[in-house]
Amino acid sequence: MKFQVKLSGPGIAFFCALILILFGTVSVSAQQDDDDQLQLGAQIYAENCAVCHGVNGEGRVGATLAKNWPSIRPDLATQATIANGVPGTAMPAWSLENGGPLTEIEIDAVVAFILSWQTGGAPEIKSVATTTSRPAISPVPDVEGDPNRGAILYDENCAVCHGLNGEGRIGAILTKNWGSIRPDLAIQSTVARGVSGTAMPAWSQENGGPLTEDEINDIVAFVMSWPAPVEPATATPESPLTSRWIGWTGVILTIFLFVILIVVVLVLQKNKQ
């Protein structure tokens, strides 16, 4: 049995219009998905990447990203760099799989946003980092710098790696007991010069970074304003002699020694007679 469909002129026109509507709907949906991904990537970039790579990918203490990527698959190269980091450089691993804070979807969104600079289609970033409202901080004795100004600078430059309160994120924990006679000088040197072979870059203008000496001193004062964590009390190990007198063993030994003492006393009295 054969079915034949004959379309007249109006029927053909309606069929063509239906096809165009379907393809248009798919195209609009795909475009909306791309826009949503770019917006997500822009937000994540502003919160995590701009502090090192610049608001518009122009570079700061990290590499310049607003460029043409010399790769057959720049998306895969960029994704791998973000997810795995670059060992021996200031680029840490950002994926959850490698101990970072970003999911695969978030990394893909950042990649799409970074690569959109090649076509000029990236959404504009209005802000990079927000500062946290904190109570006034008293000056730290014998430490140069203003901790209140340092708190703002810390939020803008350090919190993305070290955590809002120094608890660590993809960078080192800063709320700790600093093993140094002058911890302020040790921190100042680390911030200014960075740590070669690690994810800690140099932040001083003298070493190619964006911060002045006064700004670094302010950050140091803020970090030094955190109270040092209380070390857990360590139990004093018992001496072997003390441990023997604990429990039933100690009771039995006490009785045994008491009996021996009585015997010795009786023997001595008998000898006197």
Image (tube, grey):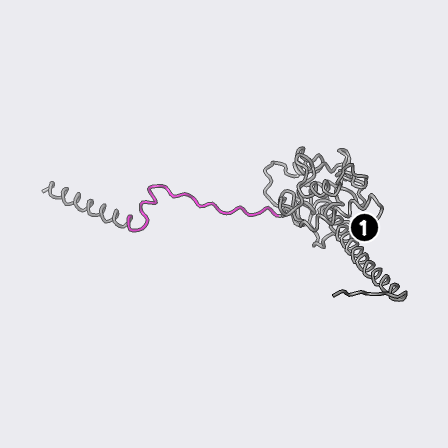
Q: Residue at x 81, y 61 (%)?
A: 22
| Outermost residue, front side | 1
Residue 153 sits above or below residue 13 on the image: above
- State whether residue 7 appears in this view: yes
Q: Residue at x 59, y 46 (%)?
A: 228
Q: Quadrant of the C terminus?
A: top left
Residue identifier under label 1: 125
Residue 71, percent from left and from top: 76, 37
| Outermost residue, right side | 9
Left or right, 248 with respect to 179, comes to left
Left or right, 5 with respect to 160, comes to right
Q: Residue 4 or 240: which is nearer the viewer?
A: 4
- State whether residue 148 appears in this view: no
Residue 180 sits above or below residue 136 on the image: above
Left or right, 265 with respect to 200, comes to left
Residue 84 sits above or below residue 130 on the image: above
Residue type, mark 1 in image: Ile
> Circle 1: is it few (<14), some (14-19), or many (20+) Cα within 10 Å?
some
- Asked whether residue 236 is drawn in magenta, I would say yes
Residue 46, percent from left and from top: 76, 49
Q: Which residues are magenta?
A: 227-249
Q: Residue 83 or 101: which is nearer the viewer?
A: 83
